[in-house]
Amino acid sequence: MGQAPLPNNEAARVKALRQLSILGTAPEAAFDDLTRLAAYICQVPIALVGLVDGDRLWFKSKVGLDVSEISRDETFCTQVMLQADLLVVGDAQQDERFANSPLVQADPAIRFYAGAPLITAEGYGLGTLCVLDYVPRQLNSAQLEALQALARQVMAQLELRRSLAELTETRNRSNDILESITDAFLARETTLLQQAILDGANYTIISTDIDGTIRTFNRAAERMLGYSADEVVGKTTPLLIHDLQEVEQRARELSEELGVAIAPGFECFVAKIRADGVEEREWTYIRKDGSRFPILLSATGLRDSNGNLTGFLGIGSDISDRKQAEEMLKLQSLRSQLLAEMSLKIRQSLQLDEILQTTVTEVQKIFQSDRVLIFRLDAEGRGRVVQEAVAPGWSSTLDLKVQDDCFGSDYLKKYRQGRTYTVNDVDTAGLEPCLVNFLEYLSVKSKLVMPILLKDQFWGLLIVHQCDRPRQWTALEVELMQQLANQIGIALAQAQMLEQATLQSQELARSNADLEQFAYVASHDLQEPLRMVASYLQLLERRYRGQLDDTADEFIDYAVDGAARMQTLINDLLDYSRVDSRGKSFVIISGSAILDRAIANLQPAIEAANATLTCAPLPKIMADATQLTQLFQNLISNALKFHSDQPLHIHVSAQHQADAWLLSVQDNGIGIDSEYADRIFLIFQRLHSRGEYPGTGIGLAICKKIVERHGGNIWVESQPGQGSTFYFTIPDRRGNSA
């Protein structure tokens, strides 16, 4: 893997990344939670949030990896950023783009990679959320969708960080401007420039005398509040432009803080200024037309040349945009938390009722709505509420059955196409009378409806009701509902797959049990008559060989050989059927001692093949000693059987990976084509005729069954003429090393 290619917008991309001020920062729970969730959902030992800087890949969050950064040229992430799409590498050693990467060839010896890009709204690729494994594998469609959804949540956290930085910068600029305005107002002699600052500032500037009577009211105050200066000069501010409830609340707070009674009036604004000089606080201004907007009010005292307090100056900045941004950021953060919790809940239980109940409960909490329900509809428009969360004081709709013309085929067709349906105000939305009546029956003033699709098929609806008032649904809320509906769709698909898998597993277990019983009974019952046939054939061979013609001798040889092969086949079938039913308990055993036992059993065959067998130190593991001996014996026998013309070398080794041991038996024999790599582990499957290589076609099937009984996997990597390496894993139940 050579020099990593650069995106066309590399300079701007790196600049956008560094503006986040995130490189080199400490771990954060918001990122670590998403990384752990990715590892859990994809069932892999390694998950990373990596950000690609100029010459390095730095990990903001990591699971299963100790390093904090690596060279950019060594990474998979650069390829993800170039294609700006999900990248899945099932086996890195077989992918020419990555086969020579140090990450693949050396520690940590990565074989599997899946990464989703982290892309800003401007199109800059910052890095990836990726999952990795030490063995080849694939992710199912639900895992791939979840990985992409989690990557979007990582990106949301990065955008959140950028927005907070921008808000801080804006706040600092505002403070500088406010200082300039205050200096201009307090100047002994107001210059034309200073007057221009006061009149042209985009801030309300209101001054009062010592008792709160308004003395000045600048042009920005006129524009923002709708009053002319003539209308307000001479009046008291709290009675004119402030929310009385806020003033009363502030009076209670100050009374408790200062230990003296503060009346709910002008003194609420200046009590602390009299002592400290300045106070900054958020308030709500009320315009002349009754509308409201939030402000940040900075108030200070005005003093004469002797330092005596003569009045007060209040400078207010409209913070509507900031408050809206803060609310959106808060909702975005809550959305990330909710989606993470829901995804985890989906993968933990797969109990549909529990998943749906979690959904409605959490959505109601996030949206602060009066009712959230999941409505199941059929093709005819009939349906019922299957789960709900409802606030106190509002009626329950649980198990409410609906059959109404309002839910006819045309209405449902739009939902099947993924339609999102928002009603901000039932009274003014122009709905069909039947639907209005239905919503009034449920006391609904506003609603948001999102279809739930199961594998692109319409399943039902996720609905939010606001009952106390009309409500304007924001784009962020609609997007959140869409993602939640997608999560429910994934849950439904997984629950369905689990049910199908459970039924198939039960049927397979029953079939296997019947097969094993049949194999055992048939083999056991065939043993005695076969021994009799074999004995008489051998007697016939000894007594009459050479006394009959050549054809008779040939027939006798065929019969004796066939009986011997039948006995071998029956014994192998008995071994296969007994792996599960006659297996022994797992105990701590020495891998090296077990291998020595297997080699001793095969010593004559090893010497006959003139083979060299080497072995690295093997660990102590929890296993069935007899079956592990048979496993090694079968794999070594396989290497002895399928050797080439060159001197045979067999090597056995072990490597610790995550929570398992990876053991291997490598040879330099004839090898096999990769297209047969799975077939050879099936019972009775042979790639060669018995004339070329003897055997029953059961040995590797027994190996697979032994490994699976121990909770591991087995596979082969090979190329014709270049030998084979059989790998198998055994869970490390001791957590030790060799």
Image (cartoon, helix red, strand yellow):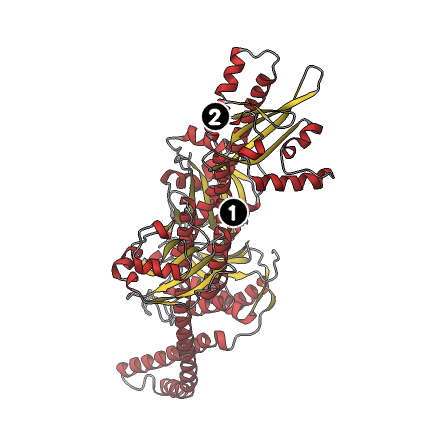
Between the residue at mark 2 and the residue at mark 1, the CA separation in whole angstroms equals: 73 Å
Q: Residue at x 43, y 65 (%)?
A: 397
- Horizontally, residue 688 falls left or right of residue 604, namely left
Count residues near mark 1 (Cα–Cα under 10 Å), then give few for <14, some for 14-19, many for 20+: few
Q: What element carries label 1?
A: loop
Give how far across and how far down residue 656 sits, in percent: 55, 54
Residue drawn at 42 percent across, 70 percent down: 502
Q: Can residue 273 be seen in this view?
A: yes
Q: Which quarter of the picture shows residue 352? A: bottom left
Which residue occupies the foreground of this view, 261 or 99?
A: 261
Q: Look at mark 2 in the image and give the residue it sits on.
A: 228
Which residue type carries mark 2? Ser
Residue kind at label 1, given as amino acid type? Pro
Q: Where is residue 594 in the image (x, y as percent from the top left)?
A: 56, 66
Q: Residue at x 45, y 46 (%)?
A: 151
Q: From the viewer's perspective, is residue 716 above or below residue 331? A: below
